[in-house]
Amino acid sequence: MLQTAGRPIQLDTLAIAAYEHLLEYGRRDDRYLCRRFGIQPERVNAIYRLLTELCVVEKEPGRPDSWRAVEPRLAMVRLVVPLEDEARRSAVVAEQLRTQLQSLIPVHQTVTGARSHQHIDIIDDPAKLATLFSEKLAACRRRLYVLHPDDQQPWPFRDTAATLLTEAMARGVRLRGALQHGVRSCAPTPTLMEHLNGAGADLRTAVDLPAQVIVFDDDCCLVSVPGRSPDGSALPGRTTTLVIHQPLIIALLAGVCRTAWAQGAPLPAPGTDRAQVAGHLRQRILQLLAGGAKDEAVARRLGLSVRTCRRHISEIMQDLGADSRFQAGFEACSRGLLPAIGSSGRVRGDRDEWLGSESGAA
């Protein structure tokens, strides 16, 4: 079988009959072939071109109108043997190339194989992030950690979170997470948390969290931070997500998640534990105000709306009898409300009574 313009050439019944007639009668008879097979002379010419390419017919030397059949084994010598020789030479060259290139495989695997498990990717597209979250969650088998610091930040997986996370827990994935206290008053997050806790999760809230972090087993971690333009200015409503595969970084972030979860407040039944949450918020608001943070920055840091944050600040100033934020900071320091929290995790002295006020509940 030859190749002409990418198409295979094969001997068909008509070509075999033409070769047989030439071999038997020693001459080419186009009219016989046209009459017997009902074909046009152009078709006969095409048949003879094929037989010539196959080296089984040829014109007799010195007699351009005379044709003769060639013994097929001689045609093989002329046509097939050179191809076989070329194939053998190509096979030798191919084997030499294969041997040399295979020597580089261990080098490539050592370098890029290790790198593929340690690299960090950056994703800015929410659709790609949502797809990646779904894929990683589907592959998760043991545990999932989640930190979500700010309900104003978009959850790329919020619309499908309940279903996907519930399915993961049904196949044995252990879900632990911490969200900021502010989400307790920002629908629909409290309902989602209650649903997931009812399905086996352990989600809590904390006063302040560093970043949105999701850790899948020990294999991958997603860290989302507010998006930035090339000049460094913030892009409202935009996030940039780091996709981390480096084992040491994943272990570090998993430890951060565990610590935040352990220090968080369990999601209580309605009407309970408000004092603890309020106390944590008041303490953190005082710390941020003492550091010079503006209302908007405090609200953003604690996952509160600016209106709710200002209500907390107003109540703090009223309780301290202060007419300005500066006076509130002075009063808080003079009353010992801003020193560090003790090792037990609770504020010492008269701060317990003040920070536990129901008026500061989120």
Image (cartoon, rainbow, N blue to C red):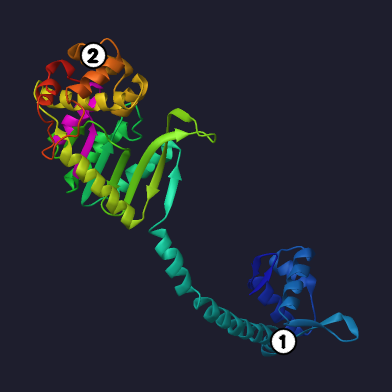
Q: Is residue 336 left or right of residue 229?
A: left
Start-end of magenta stretch: 175-197
Instruction: Examine the rendered structure and indicate whether residue 206 appears above or below residue 221.
Output: above
Q: Please provide percent x and percent y for residue 4.
A: 70, 68
- Magenta segment main secondary structure: helix
Q: Is residue 186 magenta?
A: yes
- In the image, 2 versus 197, the foreground residue is 197
Residue occupied by mark 1: 78
Query: Of helix, strand and loop, which one carries label 2?
Result: helix
**Residue at the right extreme?**
62
Crowd around label 1: few <14 · some 14–19 · many ≥20 (10 Å)? some
Q: Is residue 199 left or right of residue 208?
A: left
Numbered tag placed on residue 106 in the rendering: none
- In the image, 289 versus 105, the foreground residue is 289
Where on the picture, by quarter, is residue 175?
A: top left
Residue occupied by mark 2: 317
In front of the other: label 2 or label 1?
A: 2
Q: Please provide percent x and percent y for residue 86.
A: 66, 83
Pointers 2 and 1 in contact (C-beta within 8 Å): no
Type of the residue with mark 1? Arg
The residue under the point 24% across, 36% down is: 163
Q: Please provide percent x and percent y for residue 28.
A: 79, 78
- Mark closest to the chain's N terminus, 2 or 1: 1
Where on the picture, by quarter, is residue 89?
A: bottom right
Q: Is residue 1 left or right of residue 57?
A: left
Query: Of helix, strand and loop, which one carries label 1?
Result: helix
Type of the residue with mark 2? Met
Q: Is residue 185 magenta?
A: yes
Q: Label 2 vs label 1: CA separation?
A: 104 Å
Q: The C terminus is located in which quarter? A: top left
Q: Is residue 270 left or right of residue 141?
A: left
